[in-house]
Amino acid sequence: MSILVNDTGFVPDDAAGDIALDLPSDADPSTLDLSDTIQMIRVDFPNFADGRGFSIARQLRLRGYSGRLRASGHVIADQYAMARRAGFDEVEISADLAARQPEADWLARAHWQEGDYQARLRGVI
């Protein structure tokens, strides 16, 4: 069983009927056809030290993908703010990881916009 995390904490997965595309961490986003039929893209994180998924998310958003973008796999709570800044809408983790890093750990990072030094430098915040 997996647990879905967003800015409000652990939430039920409401994407059961969505047309989803699963991408491995070594996918090349520039080769994807981002048609309107794709409602969600799930990017795999095989381990917490593999940050290629963050680059994939950023590239997808820069290419104009506006659908649901989910990080799936071994993303830890400390990486949540980075995942959101890279363009992910949510994170899907295992129940085992959720037991080791409970909802409070994720909620502590839910205000990810507040620590964005780049936005402060641009005068956005």
Image (spheres, rainbow, N blue to C red):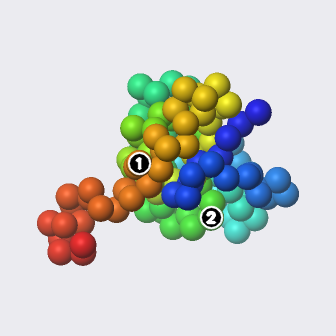
Q: Position of residue 44 (x, y in %)?
A: 59, 35
Reading the chain from its start, which is encountered first: label 1 or label 2? 2
In the depicted structure, whether residue 44 falls above or below residue 63:
above
Q: Position of residue 119 (x, y in %)?
A: 24, 66
For residue 97, say whether it is visible: yes
In the depicted structure, whether residue 56 falls above or below residue 17:
above
Q: Residue furthest right?
A: 17
Residue 100, image quadrant: top right
Residue depicted at x 46% and y 28%: 48
Which image quarter is the N terminus in?
A: top right
Residue depicted at x 77% and y 57%: 14
**The one of 9 and 25 positioned closer to us in this rendering:** 9
For residue 24, say whether it is visible: no
Q: Residue furthest front?
A: 104
Could you tell me which secondary element the residue under label 1 belongs to? loop
Q: Which residue is mark 2?
A: 67
Task: Give left or right: position of 104 versus 96.
Answer: left
Residue depicted at x 19% and y 67%: 120
In the depicted structure, whether residue 66 falls above or below residue 44:
below
Residue depicted at x 14% and y 66%: 121
Could you tell me which secondary element the residue under label 2 belongs to? loop
Q: Position of residue 87 (x, y in %)?
A: 46, 57
**Of the residues tagged 1 and 2, which is closer to the observer?**
1
Cα separation between marks 1 and 2? 26 Å
**The one of 125 and 19 positioned closer to us in this rendering:** 125
Q: Which residue is mark 1?
A: 108
Which image quarter is the C terminus in?
A: bottom left
Q: How many marks?
A: 2
